[in-house]
Image (spheres, grey):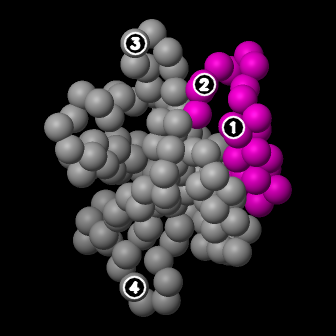
Amino acid sequence: MIQRFIELGQGYGDLFELCELMKTNHNRIHHTFVFVSEKDGNKVASVAVALKPVGESKFMPIYICREGIPYNPEKQSKRFEIFENAVKERDQLLITLEVKHSSIYVDPTLYYQYLIGVLRLYHYIPYLH
């Protein structure tokens, strides 16, 4: 099984696209995620949805809005609430993980490989077959 992150943006207008992807593909949702990281003392969130492969395909897309949403569990931003509501409307569990910030990686591809490793480690996505 090949898993690949598809970055939509940083959680501004593209957050609505992510929510629409969840709406139109609700039967394909595997898991929904919030990746919390810290940079310069501020916590930020990436929101993501992993979709099940289509038919006989061995490709699992993971759509993500990377690190553009301020994260504060006591008082969430409106954008985070929009995503959270979309997850609840689809009757999904929102999985929250604390991860390293992408800025410590030279290339976003390395960051996404790290995230895939974390998701496989915790059995949130399947291993390679």
Total marks placed: 4
The part of the chain drawn in magenta is 69-92
Q: Nearer the viewer, mark 3 or mark 2?
A: 3
Q: Between marks 3 and 2, how big is the CA–CA gap?
A: 13 Å
Q: Is residue 13 left or right of residue 129?
A: right
Instruction: Classify 10 Å Cα crowding around label 4: few (below 14), some (14-19), many (20 and above).
Output: few
| SS category of the residue bearing label 4 | loop
Instruction: Classify 10 Å Cα crowding around label 3: few (below 14), some (14-19), many (20 and above).
Output: few
What residue is drawn where x is 35% and y is 64%? 3
Q: Does the residue at mark 2 contact the one at mark 1 (Cβ under 8 Å)? A: yes
Q: Is residue 14 left or right of residue 93?
A: left
**Relative to 74, does residue 70 appear above or below in the rendering?**
below
Q: N-terminal of the two: label 4 or label 2? A: 4
Q: Between marks 3 and 4, how big is the CA–CA gap?
A: 41 Å
Q: N-terminal of the two: label 1 or label 3? A: 3
Instruction: Classify 10 Å Cα crowding around label 1: few (below 14), some (14-19), many (20 and above).
Output: many
Tell me the residue that label 3 is attached to.
40
Q: Would you say residue 58 is visible in this rendering?
A: yes
- Position of residue 32 measured from the top left corner of the image (x, y, whole percent): 59, 51
Residue 51 colored magenta? no
Q: N-terminal of the two: label 2 or label 1? A: 2
Q: Between marks 1 and 4, how big is the CA–CA gap?
A: 31 Å
Q: Which image quadrant: the N terminus?
A: bottom left
Tell me the residue that label 4 is attached to.
57
| SS category of the residue bearing label 1 | helix
Labelled disc at residue 71:
2
What residue is drawn where x is 51% and y is 72%? 52
Q: N-terminal of the two: label 3 or label 4? A: 3
